[in-house]
Amino acid sequence: MAGYSTRNEKVLIGGHSYRLRVLSDKQQFSDPDGHGARLGISSAQWSQFGQVWPSGRLLAQAMHRYRIANKRILELGCGIGLASLVLQRRGADVTASDMHPLAGAFLAYNAELNALPAVHYHRLRWHVPQPALGHFELIIASDVLYERDQPLLLAGVIERHASPVAEVMVTDPGRGHRAQFSSLLADQGFDLTEKRCPMDDQDAPPYRGRLLHYIRAKRCASA
């Protein structure tokens, strides 16, 4: 037995319906071998990867519109991987990543559920350098600034894996650590544009956050 229950959910992005296997509710938890605990995932955090959050829907919506030509794309903290699935459907060169023990399995199942080729997946812990992962012209994430240490960790991943000319797109519901993260990326030569983006799907929950779009036209001199 898996030790947790799931359900199927339909999400409309860009007029296309995506079928997703998600956890039944936010109280699900199963860590029989302690793998999640060793990664620092508490019982309260365990189910977060397996939900469709408003920030994730907005990121997927942005990826439906983004120009993917000649871009290698990395999603950080992908969870069930909705944004990566949207990119995969469009034929993008996308790599999804997460540290949760089940994220890769859920992503693979959801790709098959939508008759898509398997999305390249990489288990990535932000504080552990992985040079083999390479560099990307676009790095994306949704609602990843909710803990105090995350701005520094996320900025470190971007510093290691962003190409000299690169973009970073983060959907954020108004977390208090956004300013620190933006300052760290400014030190790496990124300029920020913020905008509010309503959901395309009228049935989607309201979203009061922002799309943070960072652009670096060239590597800063101090890098």
Image (tube, grey):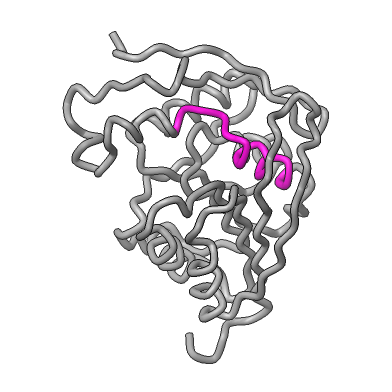
In the displayed structure, does residue 39 sit left or right of residue 11? left
Residue pictured at 75% horizontal, 42% vertical: 64
Count the labels in the image: 0
Residue at (81% x, 28% y) in the render: 202
Q: Residue at x 48, y 61 (%)?
A: 177
Residue displayed at 28% across by 39% down: 41
On screen, residue 111 above or below 113: below
Magenta segment includes 25: no
Task: Report whether 28 appears left or right of 74.
Answer: left
Q: Nearer the viewer, residue 10 or 106?
A: 10
**What quarter of the picture does the N terminus occupy?**
top left
Percent position of residue 50, x then y: 46, 28
The residue sitting at the top extreme is: 1
Q: Is residue 59 magenta?
A: yes
Is 6 situated above or below 105?
above
Q: Magenta region's main secondary structure?
A: helix
Residue 190 x/y as whole percent: 61, 75
Residue 175, above or below 221: above
Quarter of the figure with residue 214: bottom right
Q: On the picture, is 171 further left or further right than 79?
A: right
Q: Which residues are magenta?
A: 49-63
Q: Is residue 139 above or below residue 218?
A: above
The picture places residue 62, in percent across and down from the top left corner, at 73, 47
Q: Position of residue 138 (x, y in %)?
A: 62, 59
Viewer-proximal residue, 206 or 84? 206
